[in-house]
Amino acid sequence: MLRSETAADPARRHAALAGLRAYQAADRGPPHPMPPPVHRIGRAVVRDYGRASGAAGPPVLFVPSLINPPFVLDLAPDRSMLRWLGARGHHALLLDWGTPSSTERALDIGGHVATLLVPMVDWLCERFGTAPVLAGYCLGGTMAAAAAALTPVSGLAMIAAPWRFAGFGDAARARIAALWHQAEPICAPLGLVPMEVLQSAFWSLDPARTIAKFEAFAAMAPDSPAARAFVALEDWANGGAPLTYAAGAQLFDFFARDLPGSGGWTIGARAIDPAALDCPAIDFVSTSDRIVPEASAAGFADRRALDAGHVGMVVGGRARDQLWAPLADWISAVAGAR
C-alpha cells in the first residue's frame, strides 16, 4: 500500500516511514485504567461508568464493535464520552466483548447478540428495574439494533453504525470480497479471524489517509498533545481481539449480500428489522465518514448528521459538542418520556 500510494513521490514515502518509526518508538506512559467488571456472561463483561460519580439516571449500555477494543469510548481522561456522561448523571455502562477462542468458531454476529448481548440487557433490566437504553458504535450499533429487535429496550442510539451495507458502494464491497477470498483459507483452520485481516479491510477503504496520517505524525513534536492523542488512537485502531471465524464470515457476508439492509438477517427465527422497533431510535451519522459511509445508515426518522470522521465523531476535538451533548440530551428526553 505504501509503495502504490507514494510511487511518484519518494519524499512522501520517506516521511511516512519516519512517522511509522516515531509511532513505534513513542512513550506510551501508564495505561488509562478502565473500571472493573460488575457482571460477566461468558467472556463478555459490563463495566460501570456511573458508579464513581454517583449517577442515578437510567442505565445506558454502550455496545462497541467486535472490531478493535472497546476503550475508544474511554480513550483518555479528557477524551472519554463514558466518563463525561457519567459525570452528568447518566448511568453509562460499557459492554466489553472479551477475547474469543477457537472453540467458539461457530458463534456468528447474531450468536453474539443472542447469547451475550441480550442476556446482558436482561440482567440490566433485573438490576435496575427498567429496560436500558442501548447506544451502539460502529458494528456495535448494528448489533444493538438486533438486540432491540429481540428484547425490550427503552431506546436505541446508533452511532456511525452500518445497516444498509449496499451503501458502501460496489468498489469498496468488491475490495472487501477480494480480501476475504484471500484470507478465508487461513482463517478457517484457525477458527478465528485475526485483527490484521480486519485492519487490512479498513486500510483498503481509504489507503491515502492511512499514509497521510503517518506523514503528518513525522512532523509532530513527540511530547505534544497532538502526538499523544495520535498514539493513543492508533494503539486502539491497531489493537483488538480476533473475531470468531463465523462472526468474520458473517461480517463479510453482510458486505457481499447486504443481509441487514435487504431484510435477510435473521437470528433464530426472528427477522431483524429496525424499522419495526417500538422504542425511540436515533441515528448519529457522519457526512465525512470514510469507514462507515452515511449511505449505509439504518435511516431512522430521527437522524443527526455530523461533520466529523468515523472516529473523530467519538473522540475528536468537537466530539463533545457534536455528539456527546446531543446524545446526553436525547437520553434525557427518552428517560423523561417513559
Image: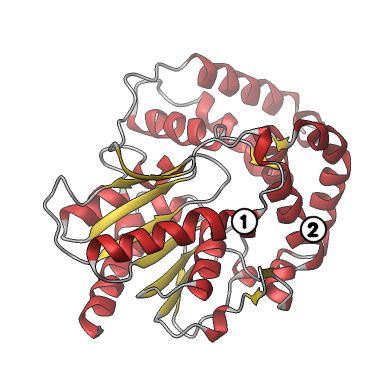
Residue 206, horizontal then vertical, whole percent: 68, 47
Residue highlighted by disc 1: 111
Q: Residue 21, located in which quarter of the rendered image?
A: top right
Q: Judge the density around disc 1: few (<14), some (14-19), many (≥20) Cα neighbours within 10 Å.
A: some
- The mark found on residue 173 in the picture is 2
Going by the image, does 174 lie left or right of 247? right
Going by the image, does 310 lie left or right of 81? right
Q: From the viewer's perspective, is residue 98 above or below residue 48?
A: above
Q: How far apart are marks 2 and 1 (CA)?
A: 24 Å
The amino acid pointed to by label 1 is Gly
- Image quadrant containing the C terminus: bottom left
Question: Who comes first in sequence, dot 2 or dot 1?
Answer: 1
Q: 120 or 242: nearer the eye? A: 120
Residue 297, horizontal then vertical, whole percent: 59, 71
The amino acid pointed to by label 2 is Arg
Going by the image, does 332 lie left or right of 289? left
Residue 117, horizontal then vertical, whole percent: 48, 57
Q: Judge the density around disc 2: few (<14), some (14-19), many (≥20) Cα neighbours within 10 Å.
A: many
Q: Can residue 268 be seen in this view?
A: yes
For image coordinates 32% across by 37% down, the residue present is 76
For image coordinates 41% across by 29% down, the residue present is 227
